[in-house]
Image (cartoon, rainbow, N blue to C red):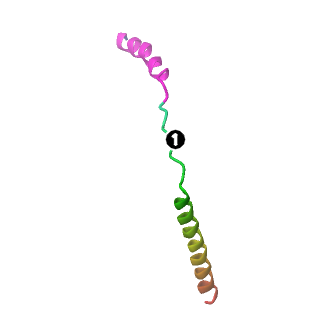
Amino acid sequence: MKALILLLTLLPGAALAQAVELPAPPPYSSGDQFWFAVASVAMVVMLAAVHWLVRRR
């Protein structure tokens, strides 16, 4: 019973702990944005090619 009382008195302390603050990621550079755009266009082209191949069956 004493252990339960001790546990219940210490338990709220964990709830009042400070939240973790994650660092903000660095902004994307223009080179990153360029390669993301190239990859996006390539993916759309590949999806169109797959659609064209499957549609012909």
Pick the front one: 47 or 14: 47
Pick the front one: 7 or 34: 34
> Does residue 17 show up magenta in the picture?
yes
Relative vertical location of residue 17 with respect to residue 3 in this rendering, above or below: below
How many numbered markers are drawn?
1
Predominant SS along the magenta part: helix
Relative vertical location of residue 11 with respect to residue 22 in this rendering, above or below: above
Relative vertical location of residue 33 with respect to residue 8 in this rendering, above or below: below
Circle 1: residue type? Ala
Judging by the rendered image, the residue that carries numbered circle 1 is 24
| Residues drawn in magenta | 2-19
Q: Is mark 1 on a helix, strand or loop?
A: loop
Q: Residue furthest bottom?
A: 57
Tell me the residue at 51%/46% (across/down): 26
The answer to which quarter of the image holds residue 10 is top left
In which quadrant is the N terminus drawn? top left
Q: Badge 1: how crowded within 10 Å, few (<14), some, or many (20+)?
A: few
Position in image of residue 17 (x %, y %): 46, 23
Pick the front one: 57 or 1: 57
In which quadrant is the C terminus drawn? bottom right
Q: Residue furthest left?
A: 3
Q: Is residue 21 left or right of residue 44?
A: left
> Does residue 48 show up magenta in the picture?
no
Q: In this view, does 40 lie to the left or right of 12?
A: right
Pick the front one: 10 or 21: 21
Position in image of residue 34 (x %, y %): 56, 64
Tell me the residue at 38%/12% (across/down): 6
Position in image of residue 42 (x %, y %): 56, 74
Q: Which residue lies furthest to the front in this view?
A: 30
Tell me the residue at 58%/81% (across/down): 50
